[in-house]
């Protein structure tokens, strides 16, 4: 059983508070008593309670990652990249506790538990939680969506990314394009919608002429959405994420069609599955690992250097060309 301050006090014949002051370098302890207490502590193998020290120093060496729960909107693939990005920034200096914003009462936030917060925000519903953290003066950074009131942000321009995706289809001769979106309650969904609409309008086309089906960023929803859209005989389907694109491919194959000869596909996120599966998906890379790493570096400046600035950092998206888009004009895979 671990030796406690109470045990040392009993052996030394002094009070608990005297032992506590002696061990913590406090004043009002006679030199001979201090020497005796330190000798007993060493002989008995006393080990300080790190949790109590952390609380006293207001330093828990713990970061909180708060996000919408996986069942709601956060993809497990995105979560993996975000956690990897955070640890690539902190190494072994901090531990990370992952919690769901929608399962957490804002008033339970405690700066004695968390030195800082990385908030993977998906929706404006997160605002109350963010405001509570600000009110409690807990250092934080918000990644994935813009927040306009006194916090640091690291994110990508998702509208610009989806604009690139649609432009790539248009540049390769596609006009009968179907879209698999997601529900509009997420900021990222609204941004991606703006992006493809902007690209279509720039070409003088009517966005309302393009068939749309709504998924939920999951594989099966992409499958069901594609089955609905294939009746329109699209030459291409633009998907709001890679996971739905892989689901769409299943529906295309079941219909006796092929990718990209009959239907081209383009996704968004550049998941590992899009790189290494038998369907090498053309997609838009939104590097969540880099977003999380950069966001954590911003947070560490606040925790360790007292940086109080509020900055917004946009990281570029990139079109990743693989093998799922056909050039309508040549009949060959687009490059």
Image: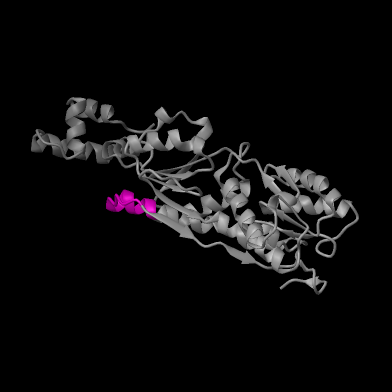
Q: Number of marks in the image?
A: 0
| Viewer-closest of 105 and 237 | 237
Q: How is the image coloured?
A: one colour
The image quarter containing residue 159 is bottom right
Q: Where is residue 332 in the image (x, y as percent from the top left)?
A: 80, 73
The magenta segment: 298-310
Instruction: Characterize the magenta stretch by its predominant secondary structure.
Output: helix
Task: Please tell me which residue is depicted at 46% across the width and 58% down the height of the picture.
Answer: 314
Task: Please tell me which residue is depicted at 52% across the width and 62% down the height of the picture.
Answer: 316
Is residue 271 at all visible to an observer of this figure? no
Left/right of residue 292 with respect to residue 279 in the rendered view: left
Task: Please tell me which residue is depicted at 70% across the width and 44% down the height of the picture.
Answer: 218
Q: In which quarter of the image is the N terminus?
A: top left
| Viewer-closest of 135 and 7 | 135
Q: Where is residue 110 in the image (x, y as percent from the top left)?
A: 37, 33
Task: Please tell me which residue is depicted at 35% across the width and 38% down the height of the picture.
Answer: 134
| Viewer-closest of 14 and 55 | 55
Q: Position of residue 291 (x, y in %)?
A: 49, 56
Q: Where is residue 169 in the image (x, y as percent from the top left)?
A: 71, 64
Residue found farthest to the right: 256
Left/right of residue 86 with respect to residue 214 in the rendered view: left
* 172 inside magenta stretch: no
Q: In which quarter of the image is the C terminus?
A: bottom right
């Amino acid at each position: 059983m671990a030796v406690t301050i109470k045990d040392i006090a009993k052996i030394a014949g002094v009070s608990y508070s005297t032992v506590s002051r002696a061990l913590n370098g406090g004043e009002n302890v006679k030199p001979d008593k201090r020497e005796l207490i330190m000798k007993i502590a060493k002989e008995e193998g006393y080990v300080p309670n790190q949790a109590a020290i952390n609380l006293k120093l207001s330093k828990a060496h713990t970061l909180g990652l708060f996000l919408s729960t996986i069942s709601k909107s956060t993809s497990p693939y995105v979560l993996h990249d975000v956690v990897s990005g955070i640890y690539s920034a902190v190494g072994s200096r901090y531990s990370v506790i992952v919690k769901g914003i929608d399962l957490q009462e804002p008033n339970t936030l405690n700066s004695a538990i968390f030195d800082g917060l990385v908030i993977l925000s998906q929706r404006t519903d997160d605002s109350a939680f963010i405001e509570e953290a600000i009110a409690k003066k807990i250092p934080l950074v918000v990644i994935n969506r813009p927040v306009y009131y006194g916090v640091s942000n690291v994110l990508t321009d998702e509208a610009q990314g989806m604009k690139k995706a649609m432009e790539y289809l248009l540049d390769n001769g596609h006009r009968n394009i179907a879209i698999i979106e997601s529900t509009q309650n997420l900021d990222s969904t609204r941004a991606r919608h703006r992006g493809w609409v902007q690209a279509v309008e720039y070409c003088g086309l009517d966005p309302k002429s393009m068939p749309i089906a709504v998924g939920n960023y999951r594989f099966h929803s992409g499958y069901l959405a594609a089955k609905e859209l294939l009746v329109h005989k699209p030459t291409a389907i633009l998907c709001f994420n890679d996971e739905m694109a892989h689901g769409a491919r299943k529906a295309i194959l079941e219909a006796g069609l092929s990718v990209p000869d009959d239907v081209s596909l383009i996704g968004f996120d550049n998941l590992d599955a899009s790189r290494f599966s038998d369907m090498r998906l053309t997609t838009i890379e939104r590097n969540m690992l880099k977003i999380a790493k950069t966001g954590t570096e911003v947070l560490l400046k606040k925790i360790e250097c007292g940086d109080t600035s509020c900055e917004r950092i946009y990281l570029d998206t990139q079109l990743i060309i693989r093998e799922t888009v056909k050039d309508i004009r040549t009949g060959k895979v687009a490059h």
